[in-house]
Amino acid sequence: METLHELANRLMALDDRIVACMRCGLCQAVCPMFWSSGMEADVARGKLALVNNLAHEMISNPDAVLEKLGRCLLCGSCQAACPPGVKIMEVFLEAREVVTAYVGLNPVKKMIFRTLLPNPGLFNFTMRVGAPMQRLVFRKTGSPQETVCAPWLNFMLGDRHMRNLASPAFHVSHPGINEPRRGDAPRVAFFPGCMGDKMYTDMSEACLKVLRHHGVAVFMPKNLACCGLPALASGDAEGMIKEVRTNMDALAGEDFDYILSPCGSCTAAIKEFWPLYAARVEPILRRRIQNLAAKAMDINAFLVNVLKVQRKEPAQGARAVTYHDSCHLRKSLGVVSEPRALIGANPAYVHKEMAEADVCCGCGGSFNLFHYDHSRKIGQRKRDNVVASGASIVAAGCPACMMQLEDVLSHNADPVKVRHTVELYAEGL
């Protein structure tokens, strides 16, 4: 537990980091939360003003401050548009951590982030027990996306349409992979992420198919944990660091050239946030984290830039696929052309650009649990652009975005399928 003196020092450091904000308002023009609420306090400029007066506000009404800071998708649109280059996402994450340290972490979140997610065995057992019980909780929606809903859990989940948990989970079908190198081809560590392991297993299977097709050796240890981003977004850096330690232990002692993930958020966490918070761990582990971060790569970028997968001429009657730019993938990692090229690498498909392809879908991780009304409203705008494109498939490079897209499309009974870009490429192999 940090002392008030330590928290005060961190607040002063935050002041130094936001002094460059010119209050120009460009963040307002690109903020999906502002489009939904119309409130200046929901814009980065408004939140930075709150952070600037954080000491007083935190003492007078800390819960309200935490709620205001939580009304953000962490999509990075404001940071990408900021002329002086204020590291807005880092400031917001630090501010959430400071206020959470002051008020205390919610007991349920503490159990999830510090006990459940850092312990893959316990987390996997919990999901394995819960999977068969889905039939008692969920009912089919009858939508083209084959989603389910749980009306009597709307108080907790919102009126959400989603996929069932996979049975079996990916780690059960593939209980540890450790393939030897094949000639001069790369050897990679595969990080499916929580959703790639427990929900979107068809996406993870497609990744294995593609990598093996190209002769790439795959290493995936049995006990990978969450990437830590959900904990970090909730102001719990301690829980995030515990999850990082678990993952570093699982990956220790193996030789690989890249660590790949089909989840843009997981890749951004490993490449950007793990080294950012590595200053809080011992020097030996810090160096290992930094070395691993340098190897982190999105799987779309790996296939196109390393393996040189190329577009092909679309076949006659090729199906139109539109593509949604996941925020972490585009704004954090700069992966833009590669997913589009991967769609074009299967001649059965032709890419068709949608309007506002780079606008946030409204998921924002746990944001859509606590602010489902805004998440759904933002998602509806994305749905409208998907449908207007005329495509029968919408692809994405992040399973969280896929889940959000399935939700809004299912609610509208739209006959549009949601797929990962790697799935589309794998079909043509």
Image: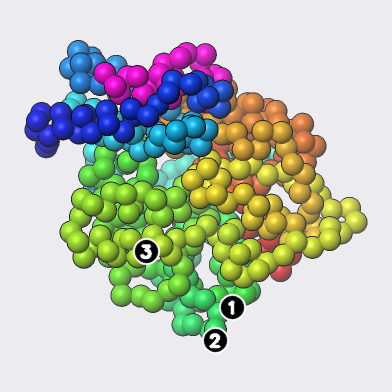
Instruction: Identify residue type, mark 3.
Output: Leu
Residue 72 spot, x, y in % from top left: 43, 27
1 vs 2, front mark:
2
* Residue with the mark numbered 2: 183
**Disc on the earlier residue, 2 or 3:** 2
The amino acid on which the numbered mark 2 sits, given as a three-letter code, is Gly
| SS category of the residue bearing label 2 | loop
Viewport quadrant of the C terminus = bottom right
**Which range of residues does the magenta coloring cover?**
31-53
Q: Is residue 382 left or right of residue 95?
A: right
* In the depicted structure, whether residue 161 falls above or below residue 265: above
Residue at point 19%, 61% (across, down): 283
Considering depth in this image, is 14 or 336 the residue closer to the camera? 14
Q: Of the residues tagged 3 and 1, which is closer to the observer?
A: 3
Q: Residue furthest right?
A: 316
Q: Position of residue 239 (x, y in %)?
A: 25, 45
| Amino acid type of the residue that numbered disc 1 sits on in the rendered structure | Gly
- Helix, strand or loop at disc 3? helix
| Residue name at image x 17 percent, y 17 percent | 59
Image disc number at residue 215: 1
Is disc 1 placed on a helix, strand or loop?
A: loop
| Residue 341 position within the rendered picture, expressed as x and y whole percent measured from the top left | 70, 56
Q: Which mark is residue 309?
A: none
Between 54 and 172, the one lying in front of the other is 54
User: Residue under circle 3?
Assistant: 292
Q: Are marks 1 and 2 in contact (CB under 8 Å)?
A: yes
Residue 389 in sight here = yes
